[in-house]
Image (cartoon, rainbow, N blue to C red):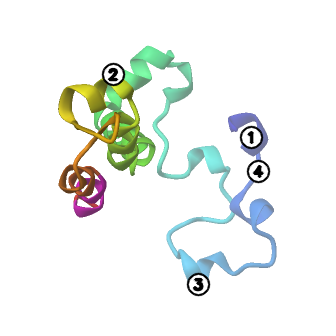
Amino acid sequence: MADILAGKTVADIVPGVALDDVVAELPRDKPLASLPGGVEGDQDLSKWETMKQNTRAIFWSTFALFTCILWGYDGLAGNIVVGIPQFRQDFGVFYENQWVIPAEWLLGFNGGGMASE
């Protein structure tokens, strides 16, 4: 990214936009590398050093990632467990030559995931 922006000004990136009206403190004639927001020498850090310096950002990014991945997983897991024959045999009742899970437990497995959302 730094190679793309090297030597360009704000006016080069957004031509025809009156940036002075939007963000008055950004000078249009200075290179983007000299603008606030970056720390000099960040490009020289290794990935591990960068992660050590930005632990809060790493934590919240990981938290958001797992929240997105696990959203709805509890309902899916409950329905999958009910389909396992050994689970039905261990926790179900024998009815008409097969093991079944009672309706109130099925309702709990299915409704529990929805109640937590």
Q: Nearer the viewer, residue 63 or 17?
A: 63
Type of the residue with mark 4: Lys
User: Which stretch appears magenta?
Assistant: 110-115
Q: Which tag, 1 or 2, sits closer to the chain's start?
A: 1
Query: How much space separates mark 4 and mark 3, taking CA atoms?
Result: 20 Å
Q: In whole angstroms, how far apart are the C-alphas of marks 3 and 2?
A: 38 Å
Whether tag 4 and tag 3 are in contact, CB under 8 A, the answer is no
The kind of residue tagged 3 is Asp
User: Which SS does the magenta portion mostly show?
Assistant: helix
Q: Give me the C-alpha separation between circle 2 and circle 4.
A: 31 Å
Callout 3 environment at 10 Å: few (<14), some (14 to 19), or many (20+)? few
> In the drawing, what numbered circle is on residue 21?
3
Q: How crowded is mark 2: few (under 14 residues within 10 Å), some or many (20 or more)?
A: few
Q: Do the residues labelled 1 and 4 touch (CB within 8 Å)?
A: yes
64 sits to left or right of 42? left
* Residue 113 painted magenta: yes
Q: Distance between the residues labelled 1 and 2?
A: 27 Å
Circle 3 SS class: helix
Query: Which residue matches tag 1?
Result: 6
Q: Which of marks 1 and 3 is nearer the N terminus?
A: 1
- Closest to the camera, between mark 3 and mark 2, is 2
Marking on residue 8: 4
